[in-house]
Amino acid sequence: GAAQATERGLPASIAALLDTQQELVGSSTLIALPEHKVKLHGRGKASQNDVWALLRSRTGYVSMAIEGKAGETFGEPLQEWLKEASAGKLARLNYLCRLLGTEYPPNNSLRYQLFHRTASALIEAERFGAPHAVMIVQSFRADALSLADYVSFGSALGSSLSQGQLTTVPRHTGPALYLGWVDCELANDSAVASVV
């Protein structure tokens, strides 16, 4: 809604976060798709992004997945997701770990949603020939548990993540990967009415 009224087609908080990385400064939206599904390797459900956007930066396209949170968790931890796991589930997790450059099997306390949502940004970056992939958590309510889960996920990928920061994740090949967390206020009635 409000992002459409901005010159770059992004909420101000997300634009400011992107601008902290030299390669992403000034990125603007070409297309944004709500509830965008990204097919993952193997059988099973696609990763459904709250918003997926293709951006243009001065250094090329940017594939950006947004995961909106308002106090809920990042789904079940791997120990729950893997209960009585089929060979297909194990193969999918192995694929996600290889794509993200983390060890397999990963720590069972990590949240599965963070794996597939981050992977969806990379998969779409590869599909569109984008040199940059970004996964941003857009938090609308303070949630220390989800923030801790996000930080733990970053550690598994070899990065030190924190609230209000966009951080580069080390990778050897493929698109550059960035993970970020931004706190946003919920829109009030007058803000919604000004867009409609």
Image: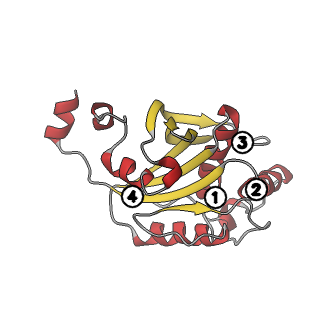
- Mark earlier in primary sequence (4, 2): 2
- At 43% from the left and 57% from the top, the residue drawn is 20
The residue that disc 3 covers is 40
Residue 149 versus residue 45 in the image, above or below = below
Residue 69 spot, x, y in % from top left = 41, 54
> What mark, if any, has residue 182 been given in the picture?
4
User: On the image, numbered disc 1 is attached to which residue?
Assistant: 112
Residues at circles 1 and 2 in contact by the CB criterion of under 8 Å: yes
Identity, as a three-letter code, of the amino acid under mark 4: Val
Label 1 vs label 2: CA separation? 9 Å
**Residue type at mark 3?**
Leu
- Judged from the image, the secondary structure of the residue bearing numbered disc 4 is strand
Q: In the image, what residue type sits under mark 1? A: Tyr
Disc 1 and disc 4: Cα gap in Å? Answer: 20 Å
Secondary structure at numbered mark 1: helix
Q: Quadrant of residue 78?
A: bottom right
Q: Nearer the viewer, residue 128 or 139?
A: 128
* Residue 93: assigned label: 2
Which badge, 3 or 4, comes first in the chain's sequence?
A: 3
**Crowding near the residue tagged with mark 4, few <14, some 14–19, many ≥20 C-alpha atoms within 10 Å:** some
Left or right: residue 134 versus residue 15 is: right
